[in-house]
Structures are given as structure tokens and as C-alpha cells.
Amino acid sequence: MLGPLNHVAIAVPDLAAAAKQWKERFDAEVSEPQAEPDHGVTVVFVSLPNTKIELLEPLGENSPIASFLAKNPRGGIHHISIETGDLLPLRDRLVDQGVTITGTGEPRPGAHGNPVIFLHPKDFNGALVELEEV
Ligand code: CO
């Protein structure tokens, strides 16, 4: 049911500076910034052999990471993303078990164009968990 770790996301106050740091300190492969207005973020991916690091910067007025950065002005680990199979049956099972899905609860296209949902941190020991249908 759970597949590989797709990425670990770090919210950052300055995306260009964060991307530069990963590039220069490690010669890491770092993607171009990608605006995701639907999610209120601009993202950059740092490629690792077995997974990715997603750097997130707020985009627009009501960015969901704005309050996170207000509490963590230097940035911090924001969520982890795990690949799954069909999301809808899994979503329904989790909801039946009392897990809260953030937002409308409906899958939306994520950074890779695949449907994603987010499980509320209150149900997962404070960790925001993204599930991505692959
Ligand atoms: Co993510």
C-alpha cells in the first residue's frame, strides 16, 4: 500500500538562496523553480539517488506555508511525501478510520501532476503526510 518515499519537503523563506546552497555545497542536481499557484507555493527539487528534497517558498496571498514560516522564520521540514497506488480507496479507508484529510479532502494534482492528498498532522504525530498516486 505504501510505496517509496517520493520526497521530503522543506519550507524556506528564500527559494533562490536555498537552491543555491544545495547546488554549491553538494554539487547537487537542482531543478528550475516551478510555480504551483493551486498549492500557493513555488518549488525546486533537489535530486538524490533514492528520493528528492522539495524546497517550498510561499506563492501568492493565501499560501498554506505562510503560517508555517511565520512560526519557523528560518524554514523547516514541512511534510513528507509517500507514493501510493489508487488514492481514492485509500482515502476512503483512512476517512473511515477517522483520519482527517486537509482541504476539501479531494485529490488534487501535485508537483509531478499526479493526484495528491495531505493527511492532517494532528492524526500523524505532528507530521504532515502527503500521499501521491503514482
Ligand atoms: Co510535496
Image (cartoon, rainbow, N blue to C red):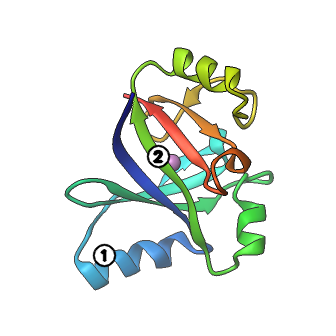
Residue at (56, 46) in percent of width and height: 129
Residue at (25, 71) in percent of width and height: 28
**Amino acid under disc 1:** Lys
Crowd class of label 1 (few under 14; some 14 to 19; many from 20; radius 10 Å) = some
Residue occupied by mark 1: 23
Above or below, 112 against 28 in this view is above
Does residue 45 appear left or right of residue 27 in this picture? right
Report x, y in % for residue 65.
69, 58
Report x, y in % for residue 70.
77, 72
Q: Is residue 104 visible?
A: yes
Tag on residue 82? none
Residue at (54, 14) in percent of width and height: 89
Above or below, 1 against 24 in this view is above
Report x, y in % for residue 19.
42, 72
Instruction: Check mark 2 vs ligand 1: CB closer than 8 Å? yes or no.
Output: yes
Report x, y in % for residue 29.
25, 64
**Amino acid under disc 2:** Ser
